Amino acid sequence: LPTLAILGATLLTGCQPVTQSLSIGDMASAYNREIWWMSIWAIALSIIIFIGVSYALFYTVQKFREDRHDAPPAQFHGNNKLETILVAVPVVIVILLSVLTVKSMAVLNPTPNQATKIDVLAKQFWWNFAYPEVTSDAGGVVTNGNEMIMPTKEAVALTITSGDVIHGFWAPNIGGQRAAMPSVKKTWQVDNDRAGVYQGNCSQLCGASHANMRYKVIALDQDRYNTTLAAMKAYRAPEPAPGSAEARGYTLFMQGKASTGATSCAACHRVQGTPAAGVQGPDLSFFGTRRTLGAGMWEAMTDAQWTDAKAAEELHAWIKHSPLVKPGSLMPTYDGSEYMVKGKMVKGGTLTDAEIDDIAAYLRSLKLPEEADYWKGTP
Ligand code: CUA
């Protein structure tokens, strides 16, 4: 019964119109439908068996109560008919469940066909999503950090790997979890028929910020998906106006500040259409369009919320000393504080608060055109 209640609850949540959802009962995904029906079969069979066994038990206890039978019970050895039934019934059940399981396995692990391809890279403690079939006009493959865009009503082949330790890719609305392992690339095909924003998590304990290793799966209807990917392909980071905060931020982003030991952001981050081509950290090309920060540590539900004072404070704190707000973050500190890299304490460089705000302003300016804002229409 508790199992039924849980399954029932997940089905109910799966049936609601989904905008921001985390549910294994999302029936818009072939994977979840298969698991659901497989569970229904297994539970139905269990209930039938439970009723049968309970009936036999109570029947026997009642019928052969001692006070009704003074004489000793019939003495006999063996009953071929009964034994045949007792073996045959479980065999039939096991065969039935095996057939259902094998059928489900084929659905849950389909052979990748003409699917849209997305390369998933897990690292301590963030995700990068690359579109290997989409080469940017500015060079390189289109990638995005911590926000995975996928089309609806179409198979999506995820090739999952890790850049360091074992992580777990798990966005329940599109399917079960898959291990992300270093040096191993596994392809797994998923889908979801309904546009929406789905929560993804790392499902494998992987270090200090395992719990801060989240991502969003944003399923867009075909035309919106195509528009977004086309805009990502054509995207070149906007040139900041000379003398603006963005322009000062751009210079700091690209060069750092050698005099105070502040390393450049470009050494670790990529911004499409600029010389920044680092791959140590998440791709920041569309940072201004993203609504999550620090691999989902902070998220905004609306664009307005994302640009308010609190979000500005969070971004400021993030750039200033990310390892202090997110344990295990490999990003250097920019307020001179010490942080740990591979078990050793190191000292970061320093930037002034004004310089940090300039970098934040530059990052905010890295926006996709309005029509390609994949968050548009979500709450
Ligand atoms: Cu990555 Cu837990």
Image (spheres, grey):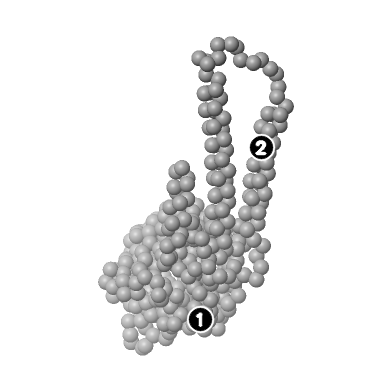
Q: Residue at x 45, y 54 (%)?
A: 10
Q: Where is residue 275 in the image (x, y as percent from the top left)?
A: 49, 79
Q: What element carries label 1?
A: helix
Instruction: Kindly give the residue lying farthest to the left in the view shown.
Output: 309
Q: Position of residue 97 (x, y in %)?
A: 63, 46
Q: Which residue is drawn at 54% across and 57% down?
A: 32
Instruction: Give the side of residue 307 with respect to residue 79, left or right.
Output: left
Instruction: Kindly give the residue lying farthest to the right in the view shown.
Output: 80
Q: What residue type is labelled 1?
A: Thr
Circles 2, 1 touching at the beta carbon (< 8 Å): no
Instruction: Kindly give the residue lying farthest to the top in the view shown.
Output: 71
Choose the circle earlier in sequence order: 2 or 1.
2
Q: Nearer the viewer, residue 343 or 97?
A: 97
Q: Name the residue under label 2.
A: 89
Please tell me whether residue 177 is drawn above or below residue 301 in the rendered image: above
Mark 1 neighbour density, 10 Å: few (under 14) some (14–19) many (20 or more) = some
Pick the quarter of the image with the C terminus. bottom left
Instruction: Give the side of residue 2 with respect to residue 350, left or right.
Output: right
Q: What residue type is labelled 2?
A: Val
Q: Position of residue 26 (x, y in %)?
A: 49, 60
- Corner quadrant of residue 252: bottom left
Q: Residue at x 56, y 40 (%)?
A: 48
Please tell me whether residue 373 is drawn above or below residue 146 in the rendered image: below
Q: Residue at x 64, y 41 (%)?
A: 93
Cα separation between marks 2 and 1: 56 Å
Q: What element carries label 2?
A: helix
Q: Is mark 2 within 8 Å of ligand 1?
A: no
Residue 235 visible in the displayed image: yes
Q: Mark 1 points at which residue?
A: 227
Q: Which of 362 and 49 is in front in this view?
A: 49
Q: Where is residue 196 in the image (x, y as percent from the top left)?
A: 45, 68
Name the disc covering residue 116, or none: none
